């Protein structure tokens, strides 16, 4: 799914992950957590704060696309303004990554890093957590149902292999529910109708976001 006005792909993480780096005796423990709503992101943040109650800072940033409405927020948590939460948020924004909460827990090691050092270290720590989690593309897909007789279904199997088949029902006729990337839907459905000489019923149902 590309954002409006952008042809860039949008990503999220494959799985939750944690990583750690040490800079001048300060520990930076970074979490990348998958989340579907802003409420969930804030709940996960509180869990991490509870896990590390004695930490010096709990820096965070998130970008959440909740049914087309995008929320983003960050906090430096008492680090100098712009040196912690903002570079963490930049990891998500520059990577076009959404539905992810990044939290970096810092235990101060006694040596000041300076604003440049903080910005660099928080950004590096967040990137490491995202790399550990891995990325998948989020694709805006149109969902269709196709109803056809068995001989037509055999003809169209190869084209369906290029789609995401969600379920298939074999009765008097075959009904297949499948998803195809929205940008390719018109061309793909046209090919199906052409192959079957319109001897099938294809109905568009709704749109969903799939991770591939």
Image: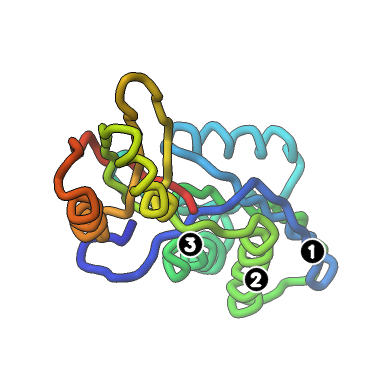
* Alpha carbons under labels 3 and 1: distance apart: 24 Å
Label whose residue precedes the other's in the sequence (1 or 2): 1
> For the view shown, which residue lies furthest in the bottom direction?
116
Per the image, the residue denoted by label 3 is: 92
Instruction: Tell me if I can see residue 23 in this picture.
Output: yes
Q: Position of residue 48 (x, y in %)?
A: 66, 39
| Above or below, comparing residue 159 to residue 172 in the picture | below
| Above or below, comparing residue 8 to residue 181 in the picture | below
Residue at the spot 26% in from the left edge and 34% down from the top edge? 148
* Alpha carbons under labels 2 and 3: distance apart: 12 Å
Is 4 displayed left or right of 104 in the figure? left
Mark 2 vs mark 3: in front: 3
* Alpha carbons under labels 1 and 2: distance apart: 14 Å
Q: Residues within 10 Å of mark 1 (few under 14, many from 20)?
A: some
Q: Nearer the viewer, residue 116 or 200?
A: 200
Q: How is the image coloured?
A: rainbow
Per the image, the residue denoted by label 2 is: 124
Q: Position of residue 173 (x, y in %)?
A: 30, 25
Label whose residue precedes the other's in the sequence (2 or 3): 3
Q: Residues within 10 Å of mark 3 (few under 14, many from 20)?
A: many
| Above or below, comparing residue 188 to residue 43 in the picture | below
Mark 3 vs mark 1: in front: 3
Per the image, the residue denoted by label 1 is: 26
Mark 1 vs mark 2: in front: 2
Label whose residue precedes the other's in the sequence (3 or 1): 1
Residue at the spot 65% in from the left edge and 55% down from the top edge? 133
> For the view shown, which residue lies furthest in the left direction?
198
Q: Secondary structure at mark 1?
A: strand
Residue at the spot 32% in from the left edge and 48% down from the top edge? 141
> For the view shown, which residue lies furthest in the front direction?
151
Q: Nearer the viewer, residue 51 or 70?
A: 70
Q: Nearer the viewer, residue 96 or 19?
A: 96
């Amino acid at each position: 799914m590309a954002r409006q006005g952008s042809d860039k792909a949008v990503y999220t993480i494959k799985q939750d992950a944690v990583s750690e780096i040490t800079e001048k005796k300060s520990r930076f423990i970074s979490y990348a957590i998958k989340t579907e709503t802003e409420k969930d992101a804030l709940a996960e943040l509180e869990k991490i704060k509870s896990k590390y109650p004695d930490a010096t800072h709990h820096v965070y940033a998130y970008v959440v696309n909740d049914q087309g409405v995008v929320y983003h927020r960050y906090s430096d948590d008492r680090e100098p303004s712009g040196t912690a939460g903002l570079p963490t948020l930049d990891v998500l924004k520059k990577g076009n990554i959404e539905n992810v909460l990044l939290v970096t827990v810092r235990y101060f090691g006694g040596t000041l890093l300076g604003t440049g050092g903080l910005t660099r270290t928080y950004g590096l720590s967040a990137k490491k957590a995202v790399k550990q989690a891995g990325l998948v593309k989020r694709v805006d897909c149109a969902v269709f149902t196709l109803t056809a007789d068995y001989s037509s279904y055999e003809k169209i199997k190869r084209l369906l292999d290029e789609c995401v088949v969600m379920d298939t029902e074999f009765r008097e006729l075959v009904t297949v529910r499948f998803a195809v990337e929205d940008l390719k839907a018109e061309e793909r459905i046209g090919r199906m109708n052409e192959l079957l000489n319109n001897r099938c019923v294809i109905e568009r149902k709704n749109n969903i976001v799939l991770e591939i």
